[in-house]
Image (tube, rainbow, N blue to C red):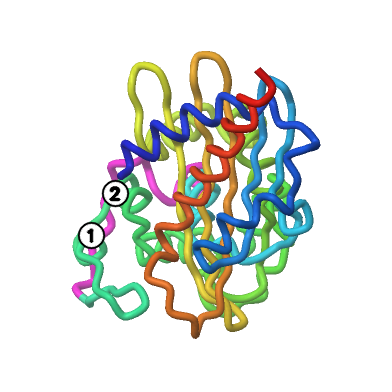
Amino acid sequence: MLREFSFKLFSILLLCSFVTASFSQENRQKEFMDCQVKGSVSIYDYNHQRWFFTDSVDARRRTLPASTFKMINTCIALETNVIKDENEVIKWDGKTKTFFGTPIPAWNKDNDLKMAFQNSTIWFYVKLAERIGRTRYRKWLRRCHSGNDNLSEKGTDFWNYGRFGISPKEQLLFLKAFYEEKLPFSKRTYEIAKRIMITEQNSNWTLRSKTGWTKSDGKDIGWYIGYYTTPENTYFFATRLWKDTAAINPNFALCRKTITSLVLDSLKKLNKLHD
């Protein structure tokens, strides 16, 4: 499934620069309706400096970032030296870790930074957050212009709970600045972070991405963000889905990627009309 998605994403993202005004926001809601969710897909075409939004209002609405926060969290942890590199291990405490009640095998063992990012190991990043501290978080988030600066949550993982928020457009701005290495991080931090963020790669393209899922105010919030680099261009994307927590939707997690793929596929079909 990941290989299929990556191939489709590669083929379709190349066509984002051909988006026209006729590609209306209203026409892009079918993918969300079919998945029984609400939300938006936001894209930035780097070479042509063009933005594309399926919903420009939603693209500016802030919510909890959930595990997509691991992108900037990784950089802050490395920059503050609370962890040495991607190979440093933090010991599992032996207590079963679950996600919404389901045990996750990858979480129930010792993890290093690379494993924790790729497996989205919550307890590992909570440990890092305890070492970083709220004062240093506020400093670094302000320096990176990331989020709404609301760190009032009493618990450690303020990115999953509380009132810290970031919008899809802000996610793209962070990704772009990270890609250009214009954030206040060292070259070493960029090198390590960019290595562990690779989801899939071959000789023609590299995909760096992160999913996220949390619950807030009676809603499930699902994210999929990242950027796709080819020899010709780089494309940044941020998809965020919503559903009522009470609504049963076993495809919610998968829809984060499939909707991204379907929306981009529509752009490919539109481009053919203009050939």
Residue annotated with mark 1:
106
Q: Considering only vertical position in the picture, is 189 above or below 75?
A: above
Please state the extent of the stretch shown in magenta in the rendering: 76-94
Q: Residues within 10 Å of mark 1 (few under 14, many from 20)?
A: some
Whether residue 208 appears in magenta in the rendering, the answer is: no
- Quarter location, residue 266: top right
How many numbered marks appear?
A: 2
- Quarter location, residue 235: top right
User: Residue 270, percent across and down?
Assistant: 64, 32
Task: Give the position of the C terminus as an image quadrant.
Answer: top right
User: Residue 98, percent across and down?
Assistant: 30, 74
Q: In the current view of this chain or complex, which residue is farthest to the top? A: 231
User: Residue 82, percent across and down?
Assistant: 44, 51
User: Residue 253, percent across and down?
Assistant: 42, 62
Q: In the current view of this chain or complex, which residue is farthest to the front? A: 273
Residue at x 37% of width, y 57% of height: 120
Residue type indicated by callout 1: Ala
Mark toward the start of the polypeptide (2 vs 1): 1
| Contact flag, marks 2 and 1 (Cβ < 8 Å) | yes
Label 2 sits on a secondary structure element that is: helix
Q: Considering only vertical position in the picture, is 51 above or below 11?
A: below
Residue annotated with mark 2:
115
Residue type indicated by callout 2: Met
Residue at x 57% of width, y 44% of height: 263
Task: Give the position of the N terminus as an image quadrant.
Answer: top left
Residue at x 34% of width, y 48% of height: 118
Label 1 sits on a secondary structure element that is: helix
Q: Residues within 10 Å of mark 2 (few under 14, many from 20)?
A: some
Between 211 and 112, the one nearer to me in the picture? 211
Between 123 and 67, the one nearer to me in the picture? 67
Residue at x 61% of width, y 35% of height: 267
